[in-house]
Each structure stands twice: as structure tokens, then as C-alpha cells.
Image (tube, rainbow, N blue to C red):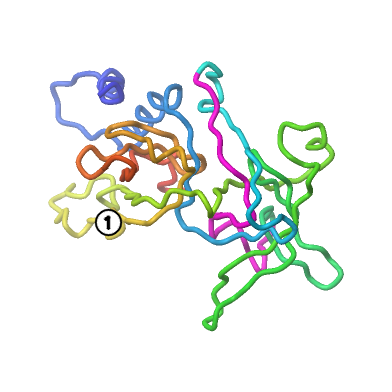
Amino acid sequence: PESIQLFCERIGVSKADGWIDMSTLEGALRDDLDPKAPRAIAVLRPLRLIVDNFHEGESVECTSPVHPHHPEMGLRRFPFTRELWIEQEDFMEVPTKGYHRFTPPVGDQPGSRVRLKYGYVVECTGFDKDADGRVTAVHVKYFEDSKSGTPGADNYKVKGNITWVSAATALAAEVRLYDRLFTEAQPDAGGKDFKAALNPNALETVTAYLEPGMKDAVADQRFQFERHGYFVADRVDSQPGKPVFNRVTTLKDSWGK
């Protein structure tokens, strides 16, 4: 409700009919939620990452702030393990120019190095494919002295910095990715049939992997999923230990760009 109040304050009151661009509402949502929404990691389109030189069954605790600007909100804690989930878009077999995430070794050229946010720097050593040619796993080696928050972390200069969760402890959860209902800003202007402008991708439902502490999310609780946007635990479908999340808005306006 606070976001809607902010939106109303910004648009004011007019006696004449008018159009308010959707980005105005989305901006109000972001400005209201950013200073108060707890942060969390969610992997929406998972790809398995295997740290080959990390021992099976071992784990190292990693921490990150609940909110980067409010240390009084405390820390989140989650484990670094041998198998992790990363986003599919964080690996490219044949990288495009300017891509700074995982790429495989080619000839004598080693694979790329990337920092796993709040964790370690790792180097890509290879990848697996299934019979249909789809990448099913990425293999890396980690550098033990590179953990975030330790003196050794400064010895590694990398451009890529990605989010991840442990495959051993991640919470599998339904996440609903709501987008704009229409593909046009004024779908019925000029007598047009608004149904022709309905967005076929206005809702996508995925099974995401979230950091383990998210199992305690309660109905209507709002979060910023790092990299992805602002989400709220569904008030009807969320159950204790099994929350369902709805996207409120993305982190930035990507329409028309």
C-alpha cells in the first residue's frame, strides 16, 4: 500500500482523463521497496556448477547483509558446497564480446575466472552436455584463499560477479514472473481492440532455487531477489516452509530498451 500511496502522490489529481505510463508505477514500487526490502538470492533458471577441487560433503559458511544499507538488520548465512546452482545465462560456450561470466578453456587459454558473490573466486575448467547438446553442468576449480571478506580476496581481480545457492540446501520454490499485461502503452487508443495487444508472456511460472533461510518467509513479506527484482510471498498459496513468490517489479525498466 505504501508504494501505491507514493504513486498517487506523484501523479496528482486531474479532472481530465489521461494516460499514466506503467513505468511511473514501477518506479514508485522500486523507490518504496528498495530501502526496506530484505535481500535474498534466488536462481530462477538453474544450471548446476560443480567445484571439482572442493571435498564432497564439506561446507563453508558464507555471510551477506540482510540489507546493504542497514547493518542493524543483521546477516544472512548460507553454505558453500561442492555443487551449486547458478543462472543458465552465467555460462556461454562461445562468449559474445564483453561477456565476463563463465566461459570454458580453449586450447592453451584457461577458462574465465568469476567471483561467486559472498564466496570464492573460481575458474571454469569445462562443462557437460546431454545427448541433445544442452549444457547440463559447468565444472570449476576454486581458490581457497579468495573468500570474500578475507585478506586474500583482494589478490584476485575479476570482472564477473554472480549469485549462487548451494544445491545441497537450496529451497525449491514456485516463483511467478509477472510482466506487463499489454505489449503497448495504450492498447485501446484510437478504437483498437485491446485484446490484440495482450502480452502472451505476461506470466511465467518457474521452479527456482532460493537460499535456505527463505523457507521462513511469511505471506505478504517482500524481498529483493538480487539481480532479479522485488518479490512478495503469496498471501493465499504460501504455506509454512513452502512459500510461493510473485514478482512485483524488476530492478530496472527494461521495456522499450
Residue density around tag 1, few if under 14, some if 14–19, many if 20 or more, within 10 Å: some
Quick check: 76 above or below 9? below
Residue 201 spot, x, y in % from top left: 31, 58
Dividing the picture into quadrants, the one containing residue 37 is top left
Quick check: 32 above or below 60? above
Dividing the picture into quadrants, the one containing residue 1 is top left
Residue 27 spot, x, y in % from top left: 38, 30
91 inside magenta stretch: yes
Residue placed under numbered mark 1 in the picture = 199
Amino acid carrying mark 1 in the image: Asn
Q: Which residues are magenta?
A: 73-97
* Of residues 242 and 249, the one drawn nearer to the viewer in this rendering: 242
Residue occupying image coordinates x 63% and y 41%? 117
* Of residues 100 and 117, the one drawn nearer to the viewer in this rendering: 117
Residue 226 spot, x, y in % from top left: 51, 39
Residue occupying image coordinates x 31% and y 33%? 218
Residue 47 spot, x, y in % from top left: 54, 61
Dividing the picture into quadrants, the one containing residue 21 is top left
128 displayed left or right of 243: right
* Of residues 241 and 43, the one drawn nearer to the viewer in this rendering: 241
* Of residues 36 and 54, the one drawn nearer to the viewer in this rendering: 54
Is label 1 in a helix, a strand or a loop?
Answer: loop
Residue occupying image coordinates x 18% and y 47%? 189
